[in-house]
Structures are given as C-alpha cells and as structure tokens.
Image (cartoon, helix red, strand yellow):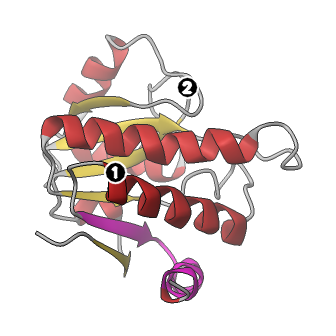
C-alpha cells in the first residue's frame, strides 16, 4: 500500500480513520478547542480512561480507545505553548507528530488524522507549525510501517491552504 498525506477541512471527530490525534493538555482531562470537541464526541468513557493515564508530557503521546467516535483510537499529545521559538517549541512539536505516528504504527493503524497541534490557544504560528508537521510526518512515513494514510485535518480553509501549499512543494 502506498503512503499518502492529504488535507481535509472537517471536524476531526467525524472522520472515519483508525486513529485521530487529540491536541491535548498535559492533564489529558479535556479542555477547549479540539480537545473539548473530542472529549464531548467520545463520551464520558474517554475521560474515565484518561484519568488512569497519569497525564502526558509535552511532546509525548498516549493512546486510548475512541469510544463513541468513528475512530478506533485517540492519540493524545500535548503540544508546546509558543513563546518565541527559542525554547524548544519546534522539537517538542515534532515530538508530538513523531510519537503519535509511533503509537499508531504499534497498533497497526492504516489511517490517522492530525489536527493543527498547538496553533489554537497555544499560539504556535500556523505556517511554522504546518512545516514542522509535514516534515516530521514525511520523514516518519519513510521509516515506519504504518499508518499509510495521514490526514491533516484543518478546521478552517485558511489552515488547509497553508498545508496544501507546503505539501505541494514536495
């Protein structure tokens, strides 16, 4: 199976993929934005499972069941809060994508959808974040056995255009 990356403008909670990535906070106990939407759509069982995980460090990831979501799994990854780019933010953000793909590969996932990690309330500049996302995923797809399909799920057309531009540069 060939490996592909594509962009979709959608609500990540509605995508039929094996795994969706949650732009979580370090507590993993829900929040606003994508995190809140995923917790609401998955139902209270997700929060109950997250309570057993003991949180998650920024740049790492943990996996849970998807419960009421179309996705089998949710991979929770806390992204970095943008300060100025000189406090390890790029490496931490790359870690989010890397660890999420590693967990998906361990489960044998054939498809995964990522939101625009850290670009909401955490303030990471969208274009910088998209460049890191695409470069990290591209490198991982060359190395990991799965997942062969990666969707960059953007909530806005503006973010989708940023990803399209970066993906089409090769």
Quadrant housing residue 141: bottom left
Q: Is residue 123 visible?
A: yes
Lateral position of residue 131 relative to residue 28, left or right: right
Vertical side of 96 occupied by 55: above or below? above
Residue 129 percent location from the top left of the image: 65, 61
Quadrant housing residue 104: top left
Residue on which disc 2 sits: 26
Crowd around label 1: few <14 · some 14–19 · many ≥20 (10 Å): few
Residue 130 percent location from the top left of the image: 59, 67
Tag 1 secondary structure:
helix
Residue on which disc 1 sits: 143
> The magenta stretch spans which residues?
149-167
Real-space CA distance between mark 1 and mark 2, rounded to the nearest whole angstrom: 28 Å
Pick whichever of labels 1 and 2 is earlier in the sequence. 2
Vertical side of 150 occupied by 106: above or below? above
Q: Nearer the viewer, residue 18 or 25?
A: 18
Residue 4 percent location from the top left of the image: 28, 73
Q: Residue at x 54, y 63 (%)?
A: 135
Q: Residue at x 43, y 64 (%)?
A: 138
In the rendered image, residue 154 lying in the magenta stretch gets the answer yes
Q: Is residue 39 visible?
A: no
């Amino acid at each position: 199976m060939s490996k592909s990356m594509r962009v979709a403008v959608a609500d990540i909670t509605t995508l039929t993929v094996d795994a969706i990535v949650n732009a979580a906070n370090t507590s993993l106990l829900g929040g606003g934005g994508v995190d809140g939407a995923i917790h609401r759509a998955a139902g209270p069982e997700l929060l109950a499972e997250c309570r057993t995980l003991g949180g998650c460090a920024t740049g790492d990831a943990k996996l849970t069941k998807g419960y009421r979501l179309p996705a089998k799994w949710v991979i929770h990854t806390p992204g970095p809060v943008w300060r100025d780019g000189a406090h390890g933010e790029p490496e931490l953000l790359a870690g989010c994508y890397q660890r999420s793909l590693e967990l998906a590969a361990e489960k044998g996932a054939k498809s995964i959808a990522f939101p625009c990690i850290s670009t909401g309330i955490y303030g990471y500049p969208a274009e910088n974040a998209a460049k890191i996302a695409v470069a990290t995923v591209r490198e991982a797809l060359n190395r990991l056995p799965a997942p062969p399909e990666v969707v960059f799920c953007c909530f806005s057309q503006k973010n989708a255009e940023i990803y399209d531009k970066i993906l089409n540069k090769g």
